[in-house]
Image (cartoon, grey):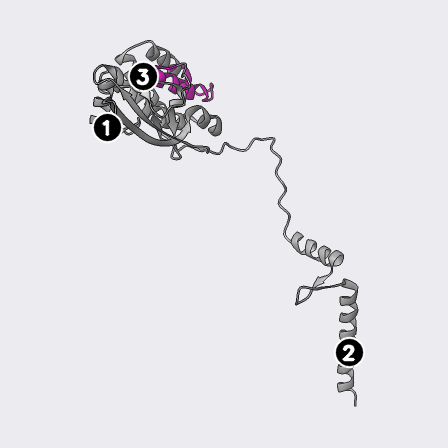
Amino acid sequence: MDAITLEHWWTGPDSGPFATWVADRSAADPVHCVRVTEVGRGADGRLVVHTGPVRGAPLPDALERIGQPTVGVAVTLTVPLLDLVVDAVSGAIVLGVARADDVLVDDAGATVLVDHPPDAVDLTGSGIVRTSETAGATALLHAARTVWERVDPRAPCRAVLDAAMAEAIGGGVAEARELLRVVRSTAAPRPVRWDPPRDDFDFVEPTPPPGDDVVARLRGWIVDGVPVPGGGKLPVRRVVVGLVVATGLAVAGVFAVSSP
């Protein structure tokens, strides 16, 4: 899996949404969203915050690698995201803005949101203007929907789950909690498989039957010669003649010994 590492240095005002995000994230120890690791002030006296590092594959790339997730794998990927949604809409955590590719999936299949604090300037950014940013909870709901849209539409849980997802995207705390309940009730979590199953039409080299290696070795000796100590090779004809002569001498010796 092609993973990336995300970390940022943010700066912003001492009051307002940025300061609220910094204070909330510094007081928490979140597992499935980025952490504040350092807080200080820059040369201009402005608040500076370091977040990360977090390593993993962006969710869209991870889904391409996984292929079609099973229901259990979809539960593994989305339950942590929906837990964050419930916490965010109920006021238990403050989320910034995010996009689908701000959700990273690590090697173990754990999802982590690398949200961006509001009203902040990224001191390590490339200057590229990000588009399609939404509030963190909304971005997480869209990310969860992206995962479930890849699950087999014939799965019995899809109809109920799709309806609950639509309600949660336009709803509040009650709808978010109901969606989380529905997802948890679909199946037990299952580990993420990074290598998708082989396609039915993939061609695989046949496994040679036992003994083919001996035939191949004899064929090689006939074409290239028989290896001898020292790195040289003797033509097969010479080896055969030598064996015949040696056998004849041995037989003659036996007759000579056994004759009166």
Disc 1 or disc 3, which is closer to the eye? 1
Mark 1: which secondary structure?
Answer: strand
Question: Which labelled disc corresponds to residue 39?
Answer: 1
Name the front one of labels 2 and 3: 3
Quarter containing the C terminus = bottom right
- Kindly report the distance in space between the C-alpha atoms of the residues bearing marks 2 and 3: 92 Å
Q: Quadrant of residue 223?
A: bottom right
Mark 3, residues whose alpha carbon is within 10 Å: few (<14), some, or many (≥20)? many
Residue stretch in magenta: 133-160
Query: What residue sits 33% from the left and 13% below the top?
Result: 168
Identify the residue at horizontal 78%, vertical 67% (top origin). 238
State the CA–CA distance, disc 1 to disc 3: 25 Å
- Return the mark for residue 249: 2
Dot placed on the residue nearer the N-terminal end, 1 or 3: 1
Q: Residue 137, position in %: x, y?
A: 31, 16
Residue 36 rendering spot, x and y as whole percentages: 26, 28
